[in-house]
Amino acid sequence: MAWNKPGGEKDPWSQGGGRDEGPNVEDFLRRLRGSLGRAMGGGGGKGGTGAGEGGPNFLLIAAALLALWFLLDAWVMIDERQRGVVLRFGKFDRVLTPGPNFKLPRPLESVTKVDVTQLRSISDQVRMLTRDENIVQIEYNVQYQVADPKLYLFGARDPDDTLRQATESAVRDVVGSSEMDEVLTGERAALAAEARQRLQATLDSYGTGLQVSVFNLQNARPPSEVREAFDDAISAREDKERIESEAEAYASKVVPEARGEAARIRAEAEGYKQAMIARAEGDAERFSMLAEEYRKAPEVTRQRLYLETMQEILAGNRKVYAGDGGNVLYLPIEGGGAAAAPPARLAPAMQASAAGAPGRGCHAARA
């Protein structure tokens, strides 16, 4: 039942209208208006409604509300993740740090809050030509954040779109100056670092106020139209690397063996050389000594040389024939050097030699 209907409950805000009496708003406003009227020099009494009373009181209330609004608008709270850019009469004045900050009320100063801790990200993929004129498709991802709120708001018209275009330009510049093998293999990390440096330099030159945190070349592959041919090229390169590895392994095994064999042959040749030199020097010295002895005693030396020579010859032939009458026949069955020599009666020759008649011994041997 409505409070203002006959027989209904009374308004709880009116005087005496209920068990719990609340504040009377109209009475409060009336007393406030009377106090303000007296402060302004008016004589408004209770229940007065004159024009002289209402005009000054309304202005005073409006002034008080305006002062309260100015007081509340002079303080601004900046979150920890934000920075406040203050414009005074539309011109940049300062940057507010996190916490409560004082500023002039609007329209004297205005504050634009910028989130400087939010990590923003863009991702895209492009097709481009490498230095060796191959087509490659690359996916990239860039994470960035606001480093300078002033430049972010007023340095460029659209910093985010500028970053997107500058990123594609940096990727094309880096990939276009590299070969396809470098892009598809483990060189992508170095290429991404170079692209990040170029992108940051471009953003700084444009005055975007953005800072690149992460730059990734996530995936690089040839287009699907040439995928089969590219797989064949990869297989060929892998076969080449395998054959080169096998060749290097074989070379690492054979080359040391060949070097060792060469060293052994050189050592043997050096030893043979030294032996031949020593033998030649010894033969020369022996010949010199024999010549000296021959000059001193020619007959004795001649007889000695003959006996030593015959001893050396007969010692190398094991087949002899002892015939009737004590004659010993020399049969050179083995040995090619003495095969043409006719049989000889060596016993008389030996006896003649021992008797000092080398001439007759030689004659008997020849007979």
Image: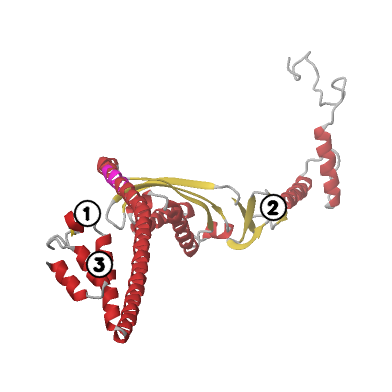
Q: Earlier in the sequence, mark 1 or mark 3?
A: 3
Judged left or right of residue 363, residue 272 is right
Q: CA distance from mark 1 to mark 3?
A: 15 Å
Point out which mark residue 319 bears: 1
Q: How would you classify the magenta stretch by its main secondary structure?
A: helix
Check disc 3: other Cα within 10 Å, few if <14, some if 14-19, many if 20+: few
Q: Secondary structure at mark 1?
A: loop
- The residue tagged 2 is 98
Q: Amino acid at mark 2?
A: Pro
In depth, the one of 123 and 163 nearer the eye is 123
Q: Viewer-proximal residue, 52 or 151?
A: 151
Task: Give the quadrant of the C terminus.
Answer: bottom left
Q: What range is drawn magenta here?
A: 232-238
Could you tell me which residue is drawn at 20 percent across and 66 percent down?
Answer: 348
SS class, disc 2: loop
Tell me how far mark 2 sits from mark 1, CA to CA.
Answer: 124 Å
Magenta-drawn stretch contains 31:
no
At 77% from the left and 15% from the top, the residue drawn is 6
Question: Which sits earlier in the primary sequence, circle 2 or circle 1?
Answer: 2
Report whether 29 appears left or right of 175.
right
Pinpoint residue 254: horizontal percent, then vertical percent.
34, 54
Quadrant position of residue 173:
bottom left
Q: Which of the two residues, 201 or 99, is positioned nearer the viewer here?
A: 201
Q: Earlier in the sequence, mark 2 or mark 3?
A: 2
| One can see residue 333 in this view | no
Q: Which of labels 2 and 3 is toward the front?
A: 3
